[in-house]
Amino acid sequence: MNSLPPIRHTPAQPTAGVLSGFEGVGRSRRWAPSTLYNGLVPDAYILGIESSCDETAAAVVRSGQELVSNVVYSQFVTHRPYGGVVPELASREHLRAIVPVVRQALDDAGRSYQTIDAIAVTKGPGLAGSLLVGLSYAKALAYAVEKPLIAVNHLEGHIHAVLLEERQKGNRELQFPVLALVVSGGHTHLFLVEGKSGAWRYRDVGHTRDDAAGEAFDKVAKLLELGYPGGPAIDFLARHGNPQAVKFPFAQIKHHDRNPQNRHADDESRVDFSYSGIKTAVLRYVETHDMREAIMRRRQALAALASPVREDYLAACDQATLDLVASFQHAMVNDLVSKTLLAVREQDAATLLVTGGVAANSELRTSFEQRASEEGLAVYFPSRKLSTDNAAMIAAAAYPRFLAGEFAAPELSADAALRLR
Ligand code: KG4
Ligand code: ZN
């Protein structure tokens, strides 16, 4: 067996403080609600495990407010030759990585299996085979060390990545109504978040009708031979191109979803997205502007390098490619920001959370910050390391469930299409 490539660590950053305000936690079976809201909740160290896509991750989080350890083993080296995640390879890599990653997270936290209070694991949505590795491991571990097991929705995890870091910074004021944009390789979702009367609740007020935004970044990068994953590659290259060079129009989607499963009673106030068209528009542009040859030359130049870095990709790009990339990113960002702010107005939201892998994008962050400040709206992002998949977000999302005694039954199974409600 090959040794695992290096894993990303986030060293412990000890912080003090009690929980209040920002938590939105529910009724507790262990502690009376009054004790809870007085900030007298005992500390709970939760071990989070995440394996829904192509990252094997484990983390320890204290009481949903302190990142104690965070280990992520990313499989992008495995999937890079294919320009996308290969599910069978992803499951195999999770199997190889899960034990050392969990051990590392506990070691970094200075904790043992006995000194954690609960184990939280991603139940879905995601790739079935990938989810099963983390879930089976977490179930076996919980049984063996006699700790409660908590099932977490991956999308809820992304939302709690923001809340965890805001609490850690000492920000405990969260103004409702809260709207969350979860934008990643597998999802583009708008949720109205309710956390006032008990556990967190989520209402889907918009989602993509076809491709996720991150998927569009990855597919365009693959088409143009810009490396994998496509989002960070495009983010870097776009800084060197003209964002106004190519215009990509987007449609406003305000009509009913044809899929009855996706229909909602309040469809009138929904704001949906669609990102399969822009991928085809980029392909058409490449063909009508004779860019195929330049793509082939780039492919050959990069294939000659053992492990090309982003500067090598930049050197292999002509100005027409850089302009196309910058225009693509600009159009994606503009559509994401405009539609999200439209939803903010429709839902009368006071706070906006933007999270998921694509939330790491520099232009997206700048644009949201600028436009939200013009509208007097508070906008929060996770740090870049907690934007993409990690297990700290799973451990943080599990904390209110831990307080409420919402533990998973032994027959817990993975749900690849799990919805967030
Ligand atoms: O949240 P995540 O790690 O996994 C999913 O839940 O899907 O998101 C991965 C996605 C990929 O599509 C990747 O290309 C995109 O996030 N991404 C970015 C950036 N960093 C990661 N997209 C745009 N700009 C970035 N800087
Ligand atoms: Zn994710």
Image (cartoon, rainbow, N blue to C red):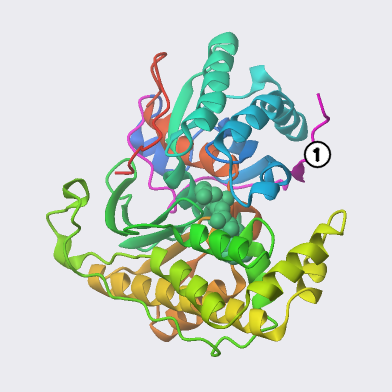
Is residue 301 placed above or below 74 in the rendered structure? below
In the rendered image, is residue 165 in sight?
Answer: no
Q: Is residue 6 magenta?
A: yes
Q: Is residue 273 magenta?
A: no
Is residue 211 placed above or below 65 in the rendered structure? below
Q: Quadrant of residue 200?
A: top left
- Please indicate whether residue 41 sits to the left or right of residue 70 in the image: left
Main secondary structure along the magenta-highlighted residues: loop
Residue sitting at x 39%, y 68%: 277
- Viewer-closest of 48 and 278: 278
Name the residue at the top extreme. 144
Residue sitting at x 40%, y 20%: 412
Is residue 378 placed above or below 401 in the rendered structure? below
Q: Position of residue 25 (x, y in %)?
A: 38, 42
Residue sitting at x 54%, y 76%: 287
- Viewer-closest of 40 and 337: 337
Q: Position of residue 251 (x, y in %)?
A: 31, 76
- Please indicate whether residue 4 sits to the left or right of residue 149 in the image: right
Residue sitting at x 16%, y 48%: 260
- Viewer-closest of 54 and 354: 54
Amino acid type, label 1: Pro
Q: Position of residue 232 (x, y in %)?
A: 65, 63
- Please indicate whether residue 63 sits to the left or right of residue 318 in the image: left
Magenta stretch in the rendered image: 1-29
**What is the secondary structure assignment of the residue under circle 1?**
loop
Q: Quadrant of residue 94?
A: top right
Residue denoted by label 1: 5
